[in-house]
Image (spheres, grey):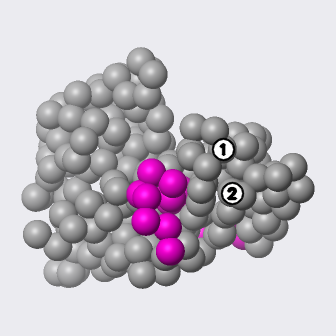
Amino acid sequence: MLLRGINNLGSKKVAMAELQEVVTSLGHTDVRTYIQSGNVLFTPQPTDSRTTDSSTAGRADAGALAAELERAIADGLGVRARAVVLSREELARCVRENPYPGETDPKRLHAIFLPEVPGPALAAWVADAERQVRAKGSRDGAKVLGRTVYLHTPDGYPRSELRRVLARVGGPTSAPVAGTARNWATVSRLVELCSE
């Protein structure tokens, strides 16, 4: 689970130990957090007693699981934050399908994870945003694959005009779409942790 917009610039403060307790209280197992930005790894409790493969249950019910986690976090911690639930397979696929494999600096590549697979309108919106900033001389690039928007910022994430455009209404990191971004170092480490 990846939480959106917590522990950033003093807003929505959440202690990772408390977050871990909330997730555990829902019956999920192997719960652990990674750094302070709301990354939680866990084995979901099967939603159906006949289901023994928890990864299948997690994939099938990602939206329902995210909603349950959001409610529990709001009730238990008093913080409203959108949650994106991804399976281990989805994280691994994100790394395998990286359209910017030549980028060696993990701070210049981000994955924006979306709550659901977007329609073609979002992919067109992202492509148009990329064209706009490139017309102004930016080298930034973005590509939508599945539930992931890859954002490549060769001149640095903080200076990225495309990053700012993607946060506008209708963009993948805007409040209505509710995507949550992680730099490539975090994405890679989460995949490693899933394999441990």
Query: Can you identify the residue that label 2 sits on?
Result: 140
Residue 105, image x, y percentages:
43, 58
- Magenta stretch: includes residue 103: yes
Q: Is residue 157 left or right of residue 1?
A: right
Q: Is residue 194 left or right of residue 111?
A: left
Residue 107 magenta-highlighted: yes
N-terminal label among 2 and 1: 2
The mark total stands at 2
Residue type at mark 1: give it: Ser
Q: Which range of residues does the magenta coloring cover?
A: 102-119
The N terminus lies in which quarter of the figure? Answer: bottom left
Q: Quadrant of residue 196?
A: bottom left
Asked if 111 appears above or below 195 in the picture, the reply is: above
Q: Residue at x 56, y 51 (%)?
A: 179
Q: Residue at x 34, y 23 (%)?
A: 13
- Mark 1 secondary-structure assignment: loop
